[in-house]
Amino acid sequence: MSAQVEPLSTKEIEDRLAELPGWSVDGDLLRRRYAFDGHLPAAVMVIHIAQIQEELGHHADLTLSYNRLGIAVNTHSIGGRITRLDFGLARRIEEIAPSHGAR
Ligand SMILES: C[C@H](O)[C@H](O)[C@H]1CNC2=NC(N)=NC(=O)C2=N1
């Protein structure tokens, strides 16, 4: 069992958001929406994110539309608060986004 992760403070969240343009906090969710040139690149990015999520053991809610992808994540194990695990996943998603033509 890993140690329980702590919710981030408002200040900690603001500092981390400043380094992640395009991401925002909506209640207790860390969110971003991406747009693509078509459906297939968006669907391929879903699979790539799924691989990262399995590697990290941390999973966002992914909403695939035609050429849009919505991402919403928090940490279920502490009752749905934003933690470093959520920002860790967000940073990994940002790293791969350009290679999928996400904007
Ligand atoms: C055992 C496994 O790592 C846990 O159930 C993970 C899986 N993915 C998860 N994803 C998210 N978003 N929050 C969690 O608390 C969480 N817990």
Image: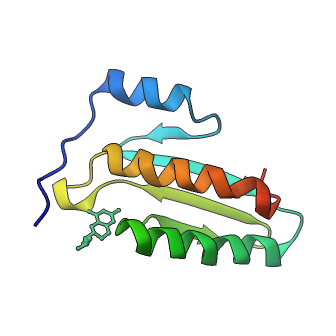
Residue 6 position by quadrant: top left
Asked whether, in this view, residue 62 is left or right of residue 58, the answer is right
Residue 44 position by quadrant: bottom right
Of the 4 image quadrants, the one containing the N terminus is bottom left
Q: Is residue 65 visible?
A: no
Q: Position of residue 103 (x, y in %)?
A: 78, 50
Q: Position of residue 47 (x, y in %)?
A: 62, 78
Q: Quadrant of ligand 1?
A: bottom left
Q: Is residue 63 visible?
A: yes
The vertical placement of 12 against 52, above or below, is above
Residue plotted at (58% across, 36% down): 20
Q: Nearer the viewer, residue 56 or 12?
A: 56
Residue plotted at (30% across, 44% down): 83
Asked whether, in this view, residue 80 is left or right of residue 35, the answer is left
Q: Position of residue 77 (x, y in %)?
A: 19, 61
Residue plotted at (80% across, 67% down): 67
